[in-house]
Amino acid sequence: MADFHTCKKCGAPLGQDDIAIYKKMVLRTADEFLCIDCLAEYFGVSREAIEAKVRYFRESGTCALFR
């Protein structure tokens, strides 16, 4: 069963940004998610790199996931 409240890897609580960036970068129709830290590990990048993407999409105003 899908759990929209916790990371599927580490169990950390998820925020709106965690869910939105996972959908944007991995799978738009996902029903399980990774937190930003686990997503960064999955892609082999820093947390700051994922946070920069979140800021970019939010500031661009073109992605409905970040409104």
Image: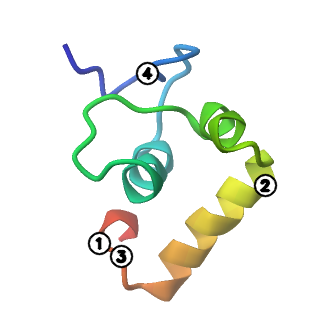
**Residue 61 x/y as whole percent:** 42, 85
Image quarter (top left, top right, bottom left or bottom right) of the C terminus: bottom left
Q: Amino acid at mark 2?
A: Glu
Q: Residue at x 37, y 85 (%)?
A: 62
- How far is the residue under mark 2 from the one under mark 4? 20 Å
Q: Amino acid at mark 4?
A: Thr
Q: Are marks 3 and 1 in contact (CB under 8 Å)?
A: yes
Q: Residues within 10 Å of mark 2 (few under 14, many from 20)?
A: few
Relative to the observer, which residue lies in front, 16 or 47?
Answer: 47
Q: Residue at x 33, y 28 (%)?
A: 32
Q: Amino acid at mark 3?
A: Cys
- Snapshot quadrant of residue 55: bottom right
Relative to the observer, which residue lies in front, 25 or 11?
Answer: 25
**Mark seen at residue 6:** 4
The local secondary structure at tag 2 comes to: helix
How many numbered marks appear?
4
- How far is the residue under mark 3 from the one under mark 2? 20 Å
Q: Are marks 3 and 4 in contact (CB under 8 Å)?
A: no
